[in-house]
Image: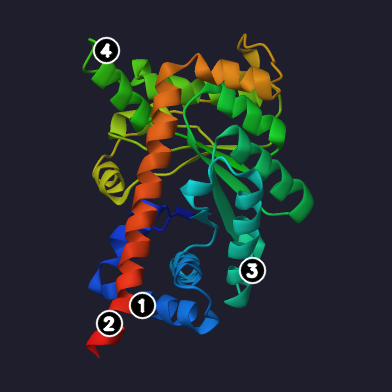
Amino acid sequence: IDEYKPLDATTNPSLILAAAQMPAYQKLVDDAVAYGKKLGGSEEEQIKNASDKLFVLFGAEILKRIPGRVSTEVDARLSFDKEGMIQRARRLIDLYKEVGVGKDRILIKLSSTWEGIQAGRVLEAEYGIHCNMTLLFSFAQAVACAEAGVTLISPFVGRILDWYVANGDKKTYEPSEDPGVKSVTKIYNYYKKFGYKTIVMGASFRNTGQIKALTGCDYLTISPKLLAELSKEHVKLTPTLSVKEAQACDLEKIHLDEKAFRWHHNEDQMAVEKLSDGIRRFAADAVKLERMLKERMFSTENGK
């Protein structure tokens, strides 16, 4: 972050899990553990509170280095629990408030399930909490997010490509033909054609070709490795996406209630598989993080 000076930054359970194991960040882990213990309650409650606190402490550290917003993810195990997601999101915002960070600098990340999208609708409209809808693979998910009025969506590129490479005969794609690039292009064009305010932030890139093919998109979230590769290139990029072109495209406006959403999403095999796979992976990393916190909080007591 110090090196590339991005506007915003994002976290997820996998990134937090990796960072929490680095020596440089042990102070944050210790502070989270102390917080969980201070609040007391059952072992499970203490671990959950420590975990939430750790996410917020990492977010607050990141915010010292960026001018924009940080994204903090709600536990993926709540992906099908609308009320649970609303409750956890509000809790995270409260924890940020405790460390002096206002909700205008936070994006709460929610899985783009039907329940997650409806939780986003409530958080935005009733609580003024900005949401970032993640694990977004299908056009149906994007339409439902736009209709819910969320602040930002993170349509995935690389994971879509992964699926097509694993499940099809074609193993390489030109950037303009990349199925992930085409997915985000369609979503961007749809949003701009029909005047949706929701920000489109392309995510999950496998190579710089995908990134360059989406030049002109509202935001892109790019890993340090790919930023390093891009920084070595000295070529002038012309935007491939533009509001003007989007408004001229021939997409039709659609409305999705729950039944229509579930049907349209279900028709996209890639999206169904990658959404459930993504939820399982983030949930597994949340479990690993909790296990690590549990060891810190409870197994050392006997040894002291």
Structural distance between the alpha carbons of marks 2 and 1: 7 Å
Dot 1 amino acid type: Met
The quadrant in which residue 199 appears is top right
What label does residue 300 carry, if any?
Answer: 2
Measuring from the top left, give residue 32's x and y in whole percent.
43, 75
Q: Nearer the viewer, mark 3 or mark 1?
A: 1
Residue at 41% x, 77% y: name it. Answer: 33
Q: Is residue 173 visible?
A: no
What label does residue 94 carry, if any?
Answer: 3
Residue at 58% x, 53% y: name it. Answer: 107
Structural distance between the alpha carbons of marks 2 and 3: 30 Å
Q: Where is the C terminus found, in terms of image quarters?
A: bottom left
Residue at 30% x, 29% y: name it. Answer: 209
Disc 1 designates what residue? 297
Q: Vertical placement of 124 versus 139: above or below?
A: below
What kind of element bears circle 4? loop
Q: Is residue 154 left or right of residue 82?
A: left
Disc 4 designates what residue? 168
Q: Is residue 197 left or right of residue 1?
A: right
Between 23 and 180, the residue placed more toward the observer is 23
